[in-house]
Image: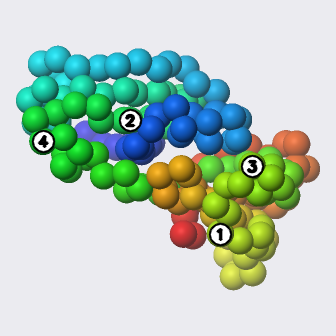
Amino acid sequence: MKVRRLDHVSVTTVDIERSLGFYQDLLGIPVTSVGEVSGAEVERLTGVAGTRMLIADLDLGDGQVLELIEYIAGEEGLALPLAHPGSGHIGLTVEDLDALSDRLLAAGARVRSEPVELTEPGAWHGVRCLTVLDPDGVAVELVERPGRPTAERGAVEGERSTS
């Protein structure tokens, strides 16, 4: 038995529609499904009677998923251990970091800095990145890797986070 690859990253949100506006509309990540889940299986999985949640799956490519969850009911309400908004960190490889930064700033997103080029020796030398906060305060690191024309930059295996 061994872990083979990342399956999904899950972020708990206060308002799933607001988060979809950020991830789908601003960052351009396609949505594959949105719906509500509840019932015995969800209660067993969370360990809380009466759990209901809205879930949206977004396609990060190569079979990887960004899962947004809004808890809407449960015996303990938002005191569920998994339901703490802002608990998470996402690193995304992007194309044209400058244009994306401009788009985020124009939309009023909470961008922590202008794009920064890393100068440390090693695998991250020359990488440009910035961190933006999603509507719930989750840090999203946007990473542009050198060595390929901007339009050809895509997901690179083995990335690490700098946030």
Asked if residue 140 is positioned above or below residue 114 in the image, the reply reads above
**x%, y% of residue 114?**
77, 70
Give how far apart the Cα atoms at labels 3 and 1 are: 14 Å
- Mark 2: few/some/many CA within 10 Å (<14, 14-19, 20+): many
Residue marked by disc 3:
107
View extreme (bottom): residue: 120
Does residue 29 appear to the left or right of 52 in the view shown?
Answer: right
Residue located beneath label 1 in the image:
112
Compared with 91, 70 (above or below) is above
Which residue in the protein does label 4 denote?
76
Which amino acid, by three-letter code, is at mark 3?
Ala
Q: Earlier in the sequence, mark 4 or mark 3?
A: 4
Find disc 2 in the rendering and name its residue. Answer: 69
Please name the amino acid that badge 4 sits on.
Answer: Glu
- Determine the secondary structure under disc 3: loop
Amino acid residing under circle 1: Arg
Residue 141 versus residue 137: which sits nearer the camera?
Answer: 137
From mark 4 to mark 3, how far is it between C-alphas?
A: 35 Å
Mark pair 4, 2: CA separation: 16 Å
Tell me where residue 140 sits by quadrant. bottom right
**In this picture, residue 11 sits left or right of residue 82:** right
Question: Element at badge 4?
Answer: loop
